Amino acid sequence: MDMSIDMQHQAMGYDRTATMFSPEGHLLQVEYAEKTVRLGSSSIGMVCSDGVFIIADKRVNDRLVVQKTASKVYEIDSHLIASVAGIVSDARVLIEKSQVLAQQHRVTYDSPVEIELIVKEISNIKQQFTQYGGARPFGVSLMMAGIDNGRPELYASDVTGNYSAYYANAIGEDDEKIKEILRQKYKQTMTLKQGIKLALEIYQEIKAKKYNLDKIELAYVKSETGKLERLEGEKIQDYTK
């Protein structure tokens, strides 16, 4: 029986290292890591007229787990939040690196760090792990949002180390379906309340019977204050009305 091209490549060892290109120009280990990201729980980020937010599905089903220890939206600095999709243990290393960079900037310059500086540094680390032998790529996509000089900003960095700024974005499970709905319904003039309501409606549509508000986590930063606020479960209920 004839082998598929992918199986042939695996048999020939093109997927055994992140540094070896297949004949078609693919880094197979990197592509496997991208598939891992799409197995992770989803997050939606949105830039609004009065701030920026990230909302995430914690997808924790075990009643024995302490919910607050299963957070999917992380505080990088008082003006900066992030969420991840993929291997959470990989993500923790990048999140902690981001927090250190933010604090070093405050100590050195006595001012909040620019969001793109953090995203670029983390993306550089990701890229290095696709180029050098002896290590595998980070199986993580990272979305970062915050207020920079009074402007709400949203960035996303993929497995390869590429990053871009977005008006609205999604990472993790069903990300393409979510982004397709965002392309149709998102408007830059939306307020935080309108954007959060849209994100919750998208979760309801995508997850259907699996939708559970108790497993949703929300963090937002208002342009006016530049300080993050966090809500979970029933506290988000007001945004569904």
Image (cartoon, grey):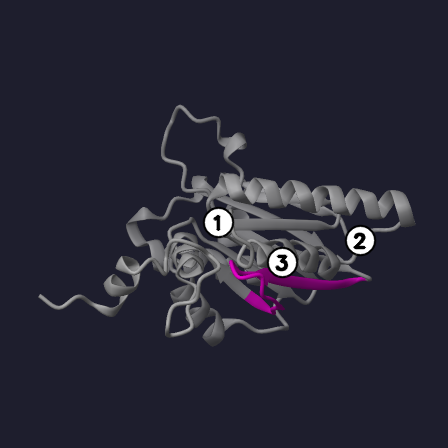
- Give the amino acid at mark 3: Ser
Mark 1 highlights which residue? Answer: 136
Mark 2 highlights which residue? Answer: 113
Mark 3 highlights which residue? Answer: 123
**Which range is magenta?**
150-168
Q: In which quarter of the image is the N terminus?
A: bottom left
In the displayed structure image, the side of residue 97 where residue 234 appears, left or right? left
Q: Is residue 229 above or below residue 68?
A: below
Q: Residue 87 carries which label?
A: none
Tell me residue 240's x, y (percent): 49, 53
**Pick the front one: 38 or 31:** 31
Q: Kindly report the distance in space between the C-alpha atoms of the residues bearing marks 1 and 3.
A: 15 Å
Element at label 2 = loop
Verify whether residue 86 appears in magenta. Answer: no
- Give the amino acid at mark 1: Arg
Mark 1 vs mark 3: give the one in front: 1
Mark 3 vs mark 2: give the one in front: 3
In the displayed structure image, the side of residue 77 where residue 132 appears, left or right? left
Q: Kindly report the distance in space between the C-alpha atoms of the residues bearing marks 3 and 2.
A: 16 Å
Sequence-wise first label, 3 or 2: 2
Tell me residue 128's x, y (percent): 60, 56
**Pick the front one: 197 or 54:** 54
Q: Which residue lies furthest to the left in this view?
A: 1
Residue that appears at 53% across and 58% down: 130
Element at label 1 = loop
Where residue 91 sits, quadrant-wise, is top right
- Give the amino acid at mark 2: Val
